[in-house]
Amino acid sequence: MIKKGRVFFGAVATFVILGVDCLVESKHSVGLATKTESLLAAGLPGELKTAQAQNQCERSSRITPAKETRKIKDDKFYLSFDIPTNYRNEKTQDDKTLMIILNNPADTKLLECCKRIRQFDCGYGTLPVWVKVEPATSETRLIPELSSTTLRLENIRETTIAKQKAFVYITKSSLTGNIDDADTYLTASFFSPDRRNNVTISTRNFGRQNIGSVEQKVFNLVVSSFAFVK
């Protein structure tokens, strides 16, 4: 089961993109929620409780990825890959980096609901897959080194992605450095043909559990369809 209170950069990026309207009226919303709770505590009619419940966006379980696919392209970094047609992609980009987050339809509905009712702190219901492009140097490694936060490397496998040498691996990582707090990440890492950029395709699961079947399926689709194009 996904824990509500834990957030990572991909999820944060998604909420920043879709949560602008929520910030505009967050002060008003907090005041309204406080007033409503006070009235309920005073024992006023239950309609208030019903109205309050209607303002909450439901977190539904993962939705199965569609069998049909559509292609995502980026002309700046000359790349493309397929995603299920019912998935939503969010892109952030500057001169040197690219991040594309792929959201399960369950989260798409959740975030749209939160934006509609101007509810900022929605949490999330599922876990995304994300593609990241960063500048590479002569010291960039396709396999990360163990560190105070990257605690374990498992199932390292050499393969080929988009005609480039690549590695797929699992890491157990924790910001606290405690393995008991570690989360599980599945990553594919490879260079662009000119070796100027490092591309990673990733997904995760909370705790030391295996990657979910839905996330694994979308991860595999992105990896198998990834190509560098001009």
Image (spheres, rainbow, N blue to C red):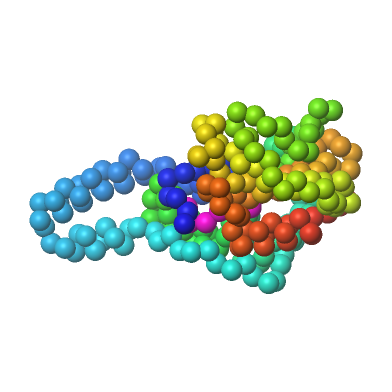
Q: Position of residue 202 (x, y in %)?
A: 67, 48
Magenta stretch, residue numbers = 124-131
Q: Is residue 130 magenta?
A: yes
Can the viewer see residue 91 in this picture? no
Residue closest to the eye, 136 or 175: 175
Taking the image as shown, residue 223 lies to the left or right of residue 125, namely right
Q: How far across and down, in percent of the image, does residue 156 sit?
A: 75, 46
Q: Nearer the viewer, residue 200 or 50?
A: 200
Q: Nearer the viewer, residue 91 or 82?
A: 82
Give residue 94's quadrant in the image. top right
Residue 215 in view in this figure: yes
Residue at x-position 42% and y-position 42%: 23
| Residue occupying the point 60% across, 28% down | 148
Main secondary structure along the magenta-highlighted residues: loop
- Picture coordinates of residue 73 (x, y %)? 76, 54
Q: Residue furthest left?
A: 43
Judge whether 145 appears above or below 74 on screen. Answer: above
Residue furthest bottom in the image: 67
- 165 magenta-colored: no
Write the residue at 66% across / 67% down.
Answer: 85
Left or right, residue 1 beside residue 229: left
Task: Name the spot of residue 44 as percent of width and height, x first.
Answer: 11, 57
Residue in the image at 73% along x and 61% along y: 221
The relative height of residue 10 versus residue 49 in the rendered view (above or below) is above
